[in-house]
Amino acid sequence: MEISQLRIALFSGNYNYVRDGANQALNRLVDYLLRQGAQVRVYAPVVENPAFEPTGTLIPIPSMAIPNRKEYRFPLGLSSRARRDLEAFAPNVLHVSSPDITAHRAVSWARGRHLPILASVHTRFETYMRYYGLGFTEPLIEAIMRRFYRRCDAVVAPSESMAEVLRKERMGFDISIWSRGVDRAIFHPARRDPAWRHAFGIADDEVVIGFLGRLVMEKGLDVFSDTMDELRRHGVPHRVLVVGDGPARNWLTNRLPGTAFAGFQSGADLGRAVASMDVLFNPSTTETFGNVTLEAMACGLPVVAAAATGSESLVDDGISGRLITPGAIHQFAQALRAYIEQPELRLRHGQAGEARSRDFDWDKINHTVAETYLRLVRQRQGHG
């Protein structure tokens, strides 16, 4: 069987209505598959004004806005229209990308027809509850996720560190890696723009600590701001540049006065913004890969990150950045201070990260997913 013979039904909780690293990866995957001649249909919630145009054919599924986070939608199952479309499409493999109600229904539909099912893990949903005072629900969510992933034939995770977590939590029996790539036409050191920095009042000799990502509390904004406080208390000169937007922007604006907010950036503008930082600080523990870490590395920046899933598989501690115990404010501050005060260390670690980022080519990475589809189809045919 060839890739061109694949007919893939892809289920996503957020394919294009809010931009994030997970749906960027899914859209790139669909683009690659379509270029190889495969047929793909995507089933996901839709909104009137999505963040970007979807790649491929998108079939709407029922959904509702999530309370307190109305920009996100919760899938509510398979409508009769979507089910009819699925039946007519007659996929030979199913791909589910979030453990929601619709994906559960889709998995049951596929199992009833003896179709192979691949699940991809993009976010550590179980950890989100900690940021909303609901940490006690984590074991229940893990149990639901374990049942979901074990009903799939295989699971792909974006990093070896995340795959190890899934194995430890017994989330499946066939777990492999679907890494992430970086667009080197957008992210590279030459994108640095001193004039762009000047527009934010940042002088050439000021060291910029950057934050990149959606402004939500689960990205570790509390740890980020506490660490900036620690640097200020010790009189360590620096500037803070935040690239991204989200519901916690006002909170962060009040928490860190004097911060330069560049807002949401994309494409070449995003590459310019990242390359114009001097060091990236990524305190988040919820990522399964850490696209922002890789993008910063491609721009020649050292990265100070939480030693957690995602960044652990990218940053070589003491070589291309620092991996710090999650939440260890003093240690984060010490690591950042070293880069602020030692420009030669900043340069050396940034160059090492840029060299490492060259290993992440999108087409090569997405080809591994296509090969996994083919393997599951062959296995299913062998059992049939």
Image (cartoon, rainbow, N blue to C red):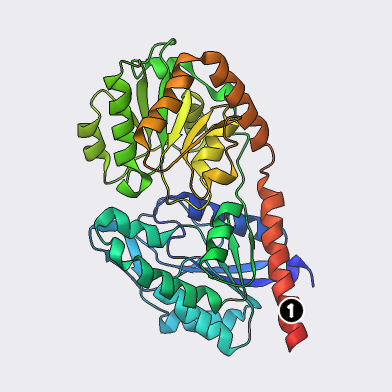
Q: Residue furthest left?
A: 254
Asked if 4 appears above or below 186 in the picture, the reply is: below
Task: Residue at 66% x, 35% y: name it.
Answer: 356
Task: Residue at 46% x, 50% y: name it.
Answer: 287
Residue 334 appears in the rendering: yes
Q: Nearer the viewer, residue 68 or 229?
A: 229
Asked if 284 appears above or below 40 in the picture, the reply is: above
| SS class, disc 1 | helix
Q: Which residue is mark 1?
A: 379
Spot occupied by residue 33 in the image (x, y as percentages of width and height): 67, 60
The reply, left or right, for residue 348 in relation to residue 268 is right
Name which residue type carries label 1: Gln
Task: Residue at 53% x, 70% y: name it.
Answer: 171
Spot occupied by residue 193 in the image (x, y as percentages of width and height): 49, 19
Residue 37 appears in the rendering: no
Q: Quadrant of the C terminus?
A: bottom right
Task: Residue at 59% x, 46% y: name it.
Answer: 313
Q: Quadrant of the N terminus?
A: bottom right
The reply, left or right, for residue 319 in relation to residue 204 is right
Question: Quadrant of residue 227 in the image?
Answer: top left
